[in-house]
Image (cartoon, grey):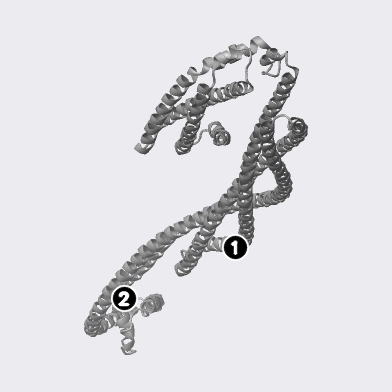
Amino acid sequence: MDTVESALPFGDAMNTGGGGSNVEILTRVELDLAFASEKLLNLEMLVMEIARRATDFEPPAFEDESVSSETVENAFELDILYGILDAEVKELVNLISSLQADIRSIEHRVYEEESGGKVKAKLDAAKATLKQMQELIADIRNESAKFEKAIQFFHETEGVEGAGCENVHLSYQTGMQTEDQHRNVLHMLEQSIASELDLDKKLSDSKSVIEDLKLKLHHQEKEIYFLEESAETVSGRMFEAENASELLFGTSKELANRLNTMQLDISEQKCQEDDLKSKLEQSLTKLSFLEKSSEKMEEESSKVGAESISLLERIQELEKQLNESNSQLQSAMESAETNQEEKNALHSELSTLENTIKNLKDDVSRAECRAQNAEIRCMQLTQANIELNGELSALKSEKSDKVNLLEKKLEESNTQLEHAKAAVDAIVEQQGMLKSTMSDMEHMIEDLKSKASKAETRAGSAESKCTLLTDTNLELSEELAFLRGRVESLENLLREANHAKMSTAKDIGIRTKIITDLVRKLALERERLHLQIATLTKKNKILAQKYKESVNVSTQMIKKATAKAKHTELQSIEKAEEIFPDFSSSKTEAEKPADLLHKGEVKAHTPAEDVSTSEDDSTSDDTHETVRTIEPSVLNRKYIFVSFLVLLAAVVVFLLQEDGSPA
């Protein structure tokens, strides 16, 4: 029965436990089955003991006028044992019903999850054991029903003799009224038996209380051990949280340094942007002079291209830095989230610790109450022992055997009292230890709360730094977008400049082709003109020779003619003078202007003739007259050639001006 009573709280705790996973419920069911099987064995032993006592107990003995004290005591013990058996059977039936409900829930979960066959095999074995237990319980109930009649007969006789009386042994006092001494002895025996029964009850109660206290102390020791382990885990987590916060602080410092370097890089990029803007303006001003200086345009475009390449490289570096800062931000956010989770876990653990401490305080208060009750019962037991000692001293003269039994029981009760006192002292010491551990736990909780507050402040600072980092990242992304737009505009300007350069190069090539064609044509024309001039000079030489020959011939003819004319004129003049004496003066006056006119015409045509200079002075007048007749054709060719050259130069100038006007 001691094993049954010690195992009861464990079974109740297992039944009242919350439903976890399938494995946890299975282990709980197996433990409950082992507990129920052990309890069934104890109940079978109890049934055997009750059956043995029921066979020894004879109900017709109550019909006699005198009933012995042993039969009353046996009947009372049988009634108590039957009540214990009935209560234990009911408790075992409730346990089996709860186990069946757990098995049904596990079967439902297993069918839903479709897990392995090991769980199903264990469930089948548990069902088989439960069926065997139910059969054994039915057998126990059938056996207990056999000796229930004797107990009912004892209760009926007890109700007839005295329902409200505390002593059940008053029925046999009626037959002993004649003998006063025998009656007094029996009365003393009844009182001793009643006090002995009370002492047995009190001892059993004290044993049960001591066992309950032992179990509760064992559970409290387990809880204290678990609390110490949880406190160690909490301290380890707090240490990890402190390390993580320090790491976060270091990473935040590194991020701040990187942000400062990034801001410096951004300021340098802004300066470079200003330089690029100024260079762009200069390049735009130089674009207007691309028609005149194509080489300068190419150099500047190459410079702008190199600067744009450097800008693109710088933008790529900035993008890499942004990606690194984003990754660092993500790691910082993840670490902040882990800090939050650890903080929440710490809060939950602190709340659980506070709840466990409250429960421990309640348990300590209950243990104190029970210890006080145990002390009160010990006082009562000491008083009862004193009374028993007095009764024993009175009964020593009458019955030595009963006195020996009572002395043995007193010794046992004294030893049990000593054990109870020792247990109470141990309980008091354990209460002191519990109080000291409670104070230590309270100090630990205060330290944990302070550490949690520090972790919260550090987490808040980390969150603020994370927000600052996000803001700076947004600003950097905006500046990067602006720089990308500027680079795109610069690239568009470079493309336009390259297109303009290509178009101007094409125009220059076309114009150079036209000029080379004109130069080629001019060279051809010059060669042709040189050839014409050479042919003309040859013709002029030939004509000059012919002219000289003709001039010589003509001079001779003229000389002959003039001689004849002069001769005729002289003859006519002589005849005229003979006829008209005034005719000679008028003739000379008329010939003078004619000669003057002839000399002027000859002078006008002499610059164009180089051939007449080589003639003699005597024949100069005559040669000029002959050149005048031949020269107009030669002069017309020269004028035509000069006019052609002038027209050609005008056409070239016009074409050059027309080509230069669109540019």
The quarter of the picture where residue 646 lies is bottom left
Write down the residue under mark 1: 265
Q: Is residue 456 above or below residue 616?
A: above
Type of the residue with mark 2: Arg
Q: Is residue 116 above or below residue 181?
A: below
Tell whether 204 sits left or right of 48: right
The quarter of the picture where residue 379 lies is top right
Front residue of 263 and 577: 263
Does the image show residue 280? Answer: yes
The quarter in which the N terminus is drawn is: top right
What is the C-alpha distance between the residues marked 2 and 1?
95 Å
Q: Could you tell me which secondary element the residue under label 2 belongs to? A: helix
Front residue of 644 and 476: 476
| Residue 628 image label | 2
Q: Could you tell me which secondary element the residue under label 1 belongs to? A: helix
Type of the residue with mark 1: Asp
* Residue at the image point whose x is 75% and y is 17% from the top: 180
Near mark 2 (Cα within 10 A), the count class, few <14, some 14-19 or many ≥20, is: some
Q: Nearer the viewer, mark 2 or mark 1?
A: 1
Near mark 1 (Cα within 10 A), the count class, few <14, some 14-19 or many ≥20, is: some
Front residue of 160 and 119: 160
* Residue at the image point whose x is 64% and y is 60% from the top: 253
Question: Of label 2 and label 1, which has the lower sequence position?
Answer: 1
* Residue at the image point whose x is 27% and y is 82% from the top: 562
Q: Is residue 594 above or below residue 510?
A: below
Tell whether 478 sits left or right of 645: right
The image shows residue 125 at horizontal and vertical percentages of 38, 33
Does the image show residue 636? Answer: no
The image shows residue 416 at horizontal and vertical percentages of 68, 39
